[in-house]
Amino acid sequence: MEPEKLEQLPEELPVEAPVQEMPSELPPTDVPVPPPDVTDRLATEFLTLVEEFPQLVSPADLPDSVLDTAAEEGIPLLDAYLRYRWQEEKKVAAATTRRQKAAQSSAGSLSRGAVETPPEQDAFLRAFRSAL
């Protein structure tokens, strides 16, 4: 500003208007907030999943439980798929363990014939029978 205009300013400046305080809570609005589109999120995450598991070609290749888990729990699709695979691997491991335990406790097949006995036991049985 020019020096001449400075002299023309009043010596007392006007008092500022009081500042209104913001309410602590905003009034509710009648406009509902749309939920984020789950389909778009899952489609984007499917592309990430395909990078890790190239054998997956389309979302139809995924079990429904994977898509449901990702949508309902709000977790990434990769996480839901890894959880599914882990559960399936645990089921297979448990079934394998059960089969191994059953095979160990089995007496064997009756169609294979008599169980082979050690030769010492056979000799003892023959000698015992002939003595009677």
Image (spheres, rainbow, N blue to C red):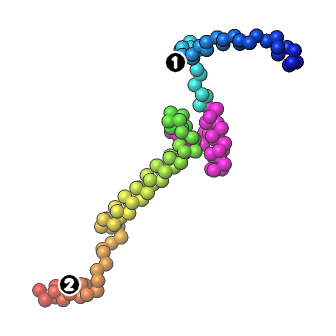
Is residue 85 rendered magenta in the image?
no
Magenta stretch bounds:
39-66
Of residue 81 and residue 122, the one placed in the foreground of this image is 81
Q: Position of residue 71 (x, y in %)?
A: 54, 34
Upstream in sequence: badge 2 or badge 1: 1
Q: Label 2 amino acid?
A: Leu
Query: What is the number of the mark on residue 8?
Result: none
Which residue is the site of mark 2? Answer: 125
Identify the residue shown where x is 52% and y is 19%: 24
- Above-or-below relation of 129 to 98: below
Q: Position of residue 41 (x, y in %)?
A: 62, 34
- Above-or-below relation of 19 to 74: above
Which quadrant does the N terminus fall into? Answer: top right
- Residue 31 falls in which quadrant of the image? top right
Q: Dot 2: what SS?
A: helix
- Residue 77 falls in which quadrant of the image? top right
- Residue 115 falls in which quadrant of the image? bottom left
Is residue 45 rendered magenta in the image?
yes
Identify the residue shown where x is 50% and y is 47%: 83
Q: Label 1 amino acid?
A: Glu
